[in-house]
Amino acid sequence: MRNLFIEGSRDTYFTPQVELNAKTGICSITGESYLEEPFEFYEKISAWFSEFFNEDDKNLQLDLKLTYFNTSSSRAILEMLRVLKDHKDEGKDVTVNWYYPDPDDEEILMEGEDFMEESGLEINMIEYEMEEEM
Amino acid sequence: MENPKYENLVDFYSSLRNRDIIVYYKGPFDEIILSEIGTKIRNKVFDPPKIGNRLFSVFMELAQNIALYSAEKNQLETGVKWGVGTIAVYETQTCYTLISGNLIKNDVLDQIVAKCEEINMLDHEGLRAMKREYRSSIIKADHKGGNIGLIQVALKSDSLELDTKEVDQEHSFFTISVNVLK
């Protein structure tokens, strides 16, 4: 099975960087998400997860470190998390980490909490140090 | 000699004279305009940075609302039709103000005003609950539109200030104004 890599970019739309590793099962989505076709984008990732779990029993870790996403993207991200919840309910080993910046910006944390409540998936909230503004 | 063609524009420009304008735009809200203006706001330095994140997020939702839902469309050379409207972003001593305006059909006006009034009655936790409820229940109902954009705007600003003005039997000009507090 192939890895899936999508380079993050900020052009007409804002594409998050996607790194899905078929060998290690360590995956990440990082950056900003404002997309022309958000559902197609996240469905592609969900399809990769489903293929990943079709093989032997594997552990998947998804690190989500999103600094901005519009509401259309947020609905597509929720769909993706629900796909992962279904895999977990089938007994697959799924870990999802949601990274939020420190200090004093709780909005990204709250987005993560809302995703956890809506998807029913357990999500680890992990604080990270914000880089200094250039 | 004054040219009447420009009189309104001069009046309008003068009315903004004492505002610290960050952005003023009127026209079709196509994807390039959205990302160009969005990036311009994103790259401006705010202290603390979270204020800039909020302003950017509110701008993007209001702009996408115009792009998708304005009753006035402009077909660009690509053949895609984009909603036409206007947005002004300016800074005051205490906040950043965003004003968006576009034409909407009178038959959906009541529905949108009612939704905004419902949003304005909720506190922060109430808005989060409403957002979760909308996002979970109407997922994919409208493929492009978040449909929760206005809730997101309210979460990141103070209340939604509305103004409506009927322009003809079918259309009204609908204005939303919000403040992102410093």
Image: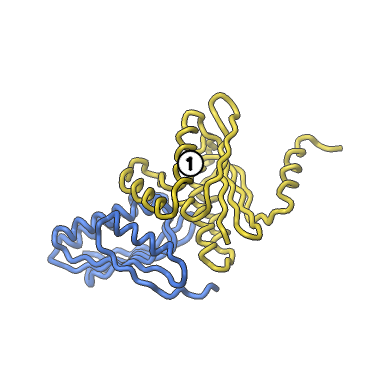
Chain colours: A blue, B yellow
Is A107 drawn above or below residue B12 in the view shown?
Answer: below
Q: Position of residue A109 (x, y in %)?
A: 39, 64
**Chain letter for mark 1:** B
Q: Position of residue B93 (x, y in %)?
A: 66, 60
Tag 1: Cα neighbours inside 10 Å, few (<14), some, or many (≥20)?
some
The image quadrant of residue B165 is: top right
Q: Nearer the viewer, residue B14 or B3?
A: B14
Residue A88, percent from left and from top: 18, 60
- Which quarter of the image is occupied by the N terminus of chain A? bottom left
Q: Nearer the viewer, residue A4 or A45?
A: A45
Q: Is residue B10 left or right of residue B74?
A: right
Say which residue appears at 77% left-offset and 38% top-offset.
B7
> From this viewpoint, which residue is outermost toward the right?
B1
- According to the image, label 1 marks what residue? B117
Label 1 element class:
helix
Residue B20: name its quadrant: bottom right
Residue B139: image location, x then y, percent? 32, 45
Q: Quadrant of residue A116?
A: bottom left
* Amino acid at the residue labelled 1: Glu
Q: Residue at x 83, y 38 (%)?
A: B2
Q: Is residue A106 visible?
A: yes
Front in this rendered view, residue A27 or A127: A127
Q: Residue at x 34, y 71 (%)?
A: A126
Question: Is residue B132 found left or right of B51 in the rendered image?
Answer: left
Front residue of A63 and A27: A63
Classify residue A9 as left or right of residue B74: left
